[in-house]
Amino acid sequence: MSILSISFFSVEILALILSLMQFYLVVRNRKNIFIASFYRLYIIDSIGNLLTWLNAVYLLRLSTIVSPTSPFSFLYLGFGEELPRISQSLSYFFAYVQYTLTATIALNRWSVMVLNPAKYEKIWLSTRALLTIAGILLVPMFDAGRFFWYKTTTTFDEEAQQFVFSSEMTLRNQFKFLIFYMPISTAIGLIMNILCFVRYSKLRSLLSNQSQRRDGHLAATSLATCIVQLCGCILSIIRYFGEDKLAESYLMLILPYVSSTLTWFQSVMLFVLSGNMRKEMKKLVLCQKEPTIMVNPANIH
């Protein structure tokens, strides 16, 4: 394992800790501090990101460390073709989930900031909206499930010193629907976020309400996430249409780093732009408690 890989993996662990802390704080303070509908979507997004990362660790990370003589070789050899095939299927499913959630968060910001804040914030916070989003996220399983129609083999590449996965399903077939979904959802997200950011920039000098400034910061977080996702989308398109095997090998080398950046970028941006998040994280790290206000019962009428 190279120094670069070790360094990047260390950064990933720090980003994972950051994301878990934010997830805990948002859930704990969802009724008093992090009450915006954005944070409800952020909770769903955090769960998706965590599962995406765990799957990527198995598929792209551990496969470069574990050897056939390692005690952990059963993860790649002991399950035959089933576990690698499930992992490959999940990698495409989670790609749908990430692109869908990024576009959904952009739609959330656009409807709340540009259209009618009071009306759409209430709609986004409803149980019906959350159930609808959950249902939409399950739809890509029908496409990802196509992996189970094809045989997947796991071999150890002696030259590269890592496990490699080979599926009878061609790359073009794997990306059959995803290759169109990625640019469309990314474009929708970018357009929505740009509209939000332009509106916020025009009204910035007039905004005195803290919640309005917060909306601007959340829009900036969503826009930055979309831009990073656009980079991942471009790399996937290059991989899909590219015929050069050498270029393909280079893309596969940087793919784990791009995937991890896409997974954890929003957590980092939220930490940078949200003053409330930094404040609550500081309290959590320093084990600070909210001051208790003592009330004299005799003064209560």
Image: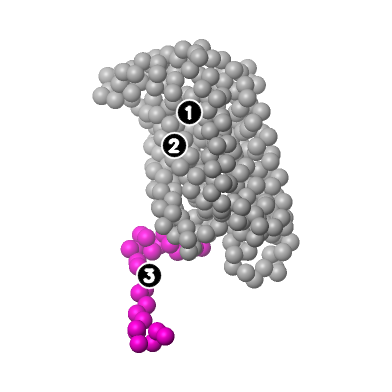
> Considering depth in this image, is 87 or 282 the residue closer to the camera?
87
Q: Residue furthest bottom?
A: 298
Given the image, on which type of amino acid does mark 2 rest? Leu
The structure residue drawn at horizontal position 54% and vertical position 49%, both measured from the top left corner, is 127
Looking at the image, tell me whether mark 2 or mark 1 is earlier in sequence order: 2
Q: Dot 1: within a 10 Å radius of its alpha carbon, few (fewer than 14), some, or many (20 or more) residues? A: many
Q: Secondary structure at mark 1?
A: helix
Residue beneath the point at 46% across and 42% down: 47
What secondary structure is found at the residue carrying circle 3?
A: loop
Q: Position of residue 63 (x, y in %)?
A: 39, 25
From the top left corner, tell me how far across and down residue 211 is, in percent: 59, 64
Horizontal arrangement in the rendering, residue 175 relative to residue 11 (left or right): right
240 vs 285, left or right, is right
Q: Is residue 117 visible?
A: yes
The residue labelled by disc 1 is 90
Task: Confirm or deny contact between disc 2 and disc 1 (CB under 8 A).
Answer: yes
Q: Which residue is mark 2?
A: 51
* Residue 1 screen position, x and y as percent: 37, 30
Instruction: State the image coordinates of residue 160 (x, y, percent, origin top left).
Output: 42, 19
Q: Is residue 298 magenta?
A: yes
